[in-house]
Image (cartoon, rainbow, N blue to C red):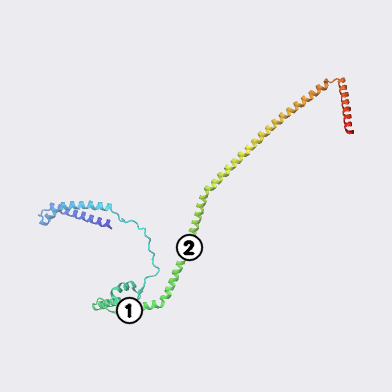
């Protein structure tokens, strides 16, 4: 609205300046001598035109700088509409009017005010009673009777419709709330799973590390067994070589000793052995008898 007013004012000022300029040209071209008022307007025209041009530039700057919605958006909550109307008296007079007049006029003040206004309008003929008044009274009586007679049933029917609508809206709201609650729970569960993902990855890393360590130890044990088996083989091989060398040495010595004994030496050794056995037998028999 501010933009529109400024634009209209600037347009009127420019239009008036153009009309004065046209009048000045017509006075300069005419043959008749201008009047005193015309001379005065002719003298005032240049200054008025300058003021109009300045005002136009000023209004255009103001128009460009100001916006229509200059106030910030309010984030205050919108008050909820009441489900039922306020209290009234006599069907149409609000209770607030009586409460407003009670401190100043008392209990009978509003009634006296209404009666006085009605008498004043009738006495001053502001309102004239005619056939339309009786028609309005008849129609009002019929309306009041209809309201008194059918008002409760119609109100109950309307309340039932309203309750059905509210019940449907509440059902939709409950369904939406339940779905949103379930979605919230699912989201929390997913967040919990995301938080436990680090623990799961740590456990998997530990499992992989344990598997690697197990494989390393198994391979180390396999290497140890292979090395021990080869060492045992080398030891057994050396023992075998040593035993075979020893047996060969014994056999060689025995063969050489046997081959070096003559038959005469053999007979003498046998005789010597028999003599020693007889001496041992006698000594043993003597010990046994003693």
Image side of residue 10 versus residue 171, left or right: left
Residue in the picture at 23% in, 56% down: 9
Image side of residue 241 versus residue 164, left or right: right
Q: Quadrant of the C terminus?
A: top right
Residue in the picture at 25% in, 51% down: 61
Image side of residue 95 versus residue 221, left or right: left
Dot in front, 1 or 2? 2
**Would you call the spot at circle 1 few (<14 residues within 10 Å), some (14-19), or many (20 or more)?**
few
Q: Is residue 268 visible?
A: yes
User: Residue 7 falls in which quadrant of the image?
Assistant: bottom left
Q: Is residue 26 visible?
A: no
Question: Where 150 falls versus 65 (above or below)?
Answer: below
Find disc 2 in the rendering and name its residue: 174
Alpha-carbon distance for marks 1 and 2? 50 Å
Question: Where 202 falls versus 250 (above or below)?
Answer: below
From the viewer's side, name the closer residue of 269 and 223: 269
Secondary element type, mark 1? helix
Label 1 vs 2, first from the N-terminus: 1
Find disc 1 in the rendering and name its residue: 137
From the viewer's side, name the closer residue of 204 and 12: 204
Residue in the picture at 89% in, 31% down: 286
Q: Mark 1 touching mark 2, by CB under 8 A?
A: no
Residue in the picture at 42% in, 75% down: 152
User: Residue 82 falls in which quadrant of the image?
Assistant: bottom left
From the viewer's side, name the closer residue of 50 and 71: 71
Question: Where 239 falls versus 87 (above or below)?
Answer: above
Secondary element type, mark 2? helix
- Residue 233 position, x and y percent, is 70, 32
Image side of residue 259 versus residue 195, left or right: right
- Residue 273 position, x and y percent, is 87, 25
In the rendered image, the residue lying farthest to the front is 290
């Amino acid at each position: 609205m501010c933009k529109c007013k400024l634009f209209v004012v600037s347009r009127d000022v420019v239009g008036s300046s153009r009309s004065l300029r046209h009048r000045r040209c017509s006075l300069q071209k005419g043959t008749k001598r201008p009047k005193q008022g015309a001379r005065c307007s002719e003298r005032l025209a240049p200054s008025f035109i300058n003021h109009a041009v300045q005002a136009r530039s000023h209004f255009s700057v103001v128009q460009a700088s100001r916006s229509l919605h200059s106030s910030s958006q309010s984030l205050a909550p919108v008050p909820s509409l009441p489900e039922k109307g306020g209290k009234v008296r006599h069907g149409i007079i609000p209770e607030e009017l009586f409460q407003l007049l009670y401190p100043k006029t008392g209990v009978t003040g509003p009634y006296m005010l209404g009666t006085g206004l009605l008498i004043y309008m009738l006495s001053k003929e502001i309102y004239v009673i005619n056939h339309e008044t009786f028609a309005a009274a008849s129609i009002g009586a019929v309306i009041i009777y209809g309201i008194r007679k059918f008002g409760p049933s119609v109100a109950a029917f309307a309340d039932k419709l309203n309750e059905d609508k509210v019940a449907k809206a509440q059902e939709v709201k409950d369904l939406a709330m339940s779905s949103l609650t379930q979605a919230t729970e699912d989201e929390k569960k997913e967040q919990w799973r995301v938080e436990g993902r680090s623990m799961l990855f740590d456990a998997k890393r530990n499992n992989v590390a344990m598997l690697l360590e197990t494989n390393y130890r198994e391979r180390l044990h396999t290497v140890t067994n292979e090395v021990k088996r080869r060492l045992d083989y080398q030891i057994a091989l050396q023992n075998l070589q040593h035993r075979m060398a020893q047996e060969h040495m014994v056999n060689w010595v025995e063969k050489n000793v046997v081959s070096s004994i003559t038959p005469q030496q053999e007979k003498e050794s046998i005789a010597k052995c028999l003599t020693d056995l007889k001496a041992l037998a006698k000594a043993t028999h003597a010990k046994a008898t003693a």
